[in-house]
Amino acid sequence: MTDRQTDAGVRDDVWIPTACDMCYNVCTVQVHRVNGVAVKIEGIPEAPPNYGKVCAKGNAGLMNLYNPNRITNPLVRTNPQKGIGVEPKWRQITWDEAMDLLVERLRAARLKDPRSLVAATFDRCSYFVLRAFMAAFGSPNATNTSAGFFCGNGVHPVAFTLTGSNDVHPDLKFCDYLLIFGSSHGFVAQQNAMGLAREMAEARTRGMKLVVVDPVCSYAASKADEWIPIRPGTDTAFALSLMNVLVNELGLYDIPYLKKYTNSTYLLRPDGHYLRDPKDGSPLVWDALNGRAGALDAVEPMNAALEGSFKLEGVEAEPAFQLFKKHLRSYPPERASEITTIPAETIRRVARELVEAARLGATIRIDGHDFPFRPAAACWYRGISAHKHGMLNGMSVAQINLLIGAVDVPGGLINSAAAGPDWRPKEGPDGLLVPGNPFTNTHLAPVPPRKVKQPESLELVEAARLGATIRMDGHDFPFRPAAACWYRGIS
């Protein structure tokens, strides 16, 4: 933006609305510019997602801008050799030279095959610009996500399975009891960092109890009502033991929720697979009212059995929940205590506090509509994901919410964005939710869509039986990538 000189020779003093790009939350901010120099960053009152607040990292944007070591001109590599410890021998060039070089490389890629241009960014501010450019260029091979091994491989797949959304977080506006595993939800971290920080402060003022399970006294743990130290990497044992207390000791769990919204009633064969209707292949459940097996859609959910053993055509079948109960018995609090170092009495107490706070069977009226009310939740993130079986660790914590019916209901664990143009969750063939994952870049899919084919390689993505729209690993392309663009819209 050009500065305007006044008659007195003093430049404008202006506030410029913009977006913070110091992390992926992209908070709304305004920058105070005086005499051509940015001097302060502030939030914009009541503007989502941060509602006028800016974290320390956001305020450090000024340091980023005026860092004396900041690269402000294009650099070109002069050493063709690449590798660890190899000096690139960067040479500074002009913007005109950089533009000529880019045009030359892009023109060559386009003439060869437009799809040979591959691009990636983690820039939430301006990904739409890259997306539009790639679509116009003729390449579907753009992504706005990471490989996933450093971020949320113990979070995102579980969240997609649970709610159809990339992320889940506690409904702090109504939650009365929050159990956090290796996370700092509500303490200026993760998704919607500033918005959740405000909601956390309001929830604590309202009286919500916060219990943090973490090997170290993190910032969240230091502010919690209770910090429960745990041996690193043993969170799953604690979660399973909590559920064992709920199911096998207290007998307290949300039966209607399990029957209506989970596969708890699906009959399983001894090999662990669903017992299916020979006519249409749909999962079978046991109709306890009529004393016979029936296809999923033919049996009223509340009549389907959660427990029992049933013999059908020589096959001994049990509901999934029955098998889950058996598995949980392997984790009594005494055994879990030996694994986690958490006292058995603490495990039993937390389980009872959680289920009592969940108010099984309660409802709440919001804006003239009645909803199930489960003001208790368990959440997790990086802490338990950074261990072996990180995804299974996340699944174990997610299951706690399912048991008490606290998923996508007021007060429980809710999705962050399971609706919208890039989120298309739907019902799968077995009656369960199938997520609409935007990270598959369905918005860049070719028209007509590619056909699903048999696997052609040993890549993991081939096992998913999807018409993949992008491959970033360079293998099995019908063409050879000619150019790669790692893009940042704001630096």
Image: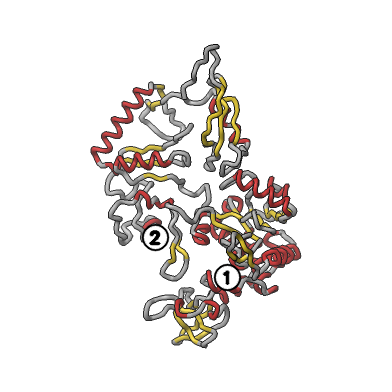
Front label number (2 vs 1): 1
Can residue 397 be seen?
A: no
Q: Residues within 10 Å of mark 2 (few under 14, many from 20)?
A: few
Residue type at mark 1: give it: Tyr
Residue 464's mark?
2
Q: In the visual, does 38 lie left or right of 136? A: right
Q: Pick whichever of labels 2 and 1 is earlier in the sequence.
A: 1
Which secondary structure lies at badge 2?
Answer: helix
Task: Report the residue at 39% width, 39% height from top.
Answer: 130
| Image x and y of residue 90, in percent | 42, 25
- Measuring from the top left, give residue 372's x and y in whole percent: 61, 66
Q: For this view, does 10 lie left or right of residue 468?
A: right
Q: Is residue 167 left or right of residue 170?
A: left
- Residue 351: which numbered mark, if any? none
Label total for image: 2
Q: Image quadrant of residue 328?
A: bottom right
Q: Position of residue 201 (x, y in %)?
A: 69, 47
Against 185, is 86 above or below? above
Crowd class of label 1 (few under 14; some 14 to 19; many from 20; radius 10 Å): many
Measured Cα–Cα span from mark 2 to mark 1? 29 Å
Q: Which residue is mark 1?
A: 257
- Residue 95 figure quarter: top left
* Residue reaching furthest to the left: 111
| Residue nearer the viewer, 271 or 204 | 204
Taking the spot 72% from the left edge, 53% from the top edge, the residue there is: 206
Q: Residue at x 56, y 75 (%)?
A: 323
| Colour logic | secondary structure
The reply to whether the C-beta atoms of the residues labelled 2 and 1 are less than 8 Å apart is no
Element type at mark 1: helix
The residue type indicated by label 2 comes to Ala
Q: Give the residue furthest to the front.
A: 368
Q: Is residue 487 at least partly visible in the picture?
A: yes
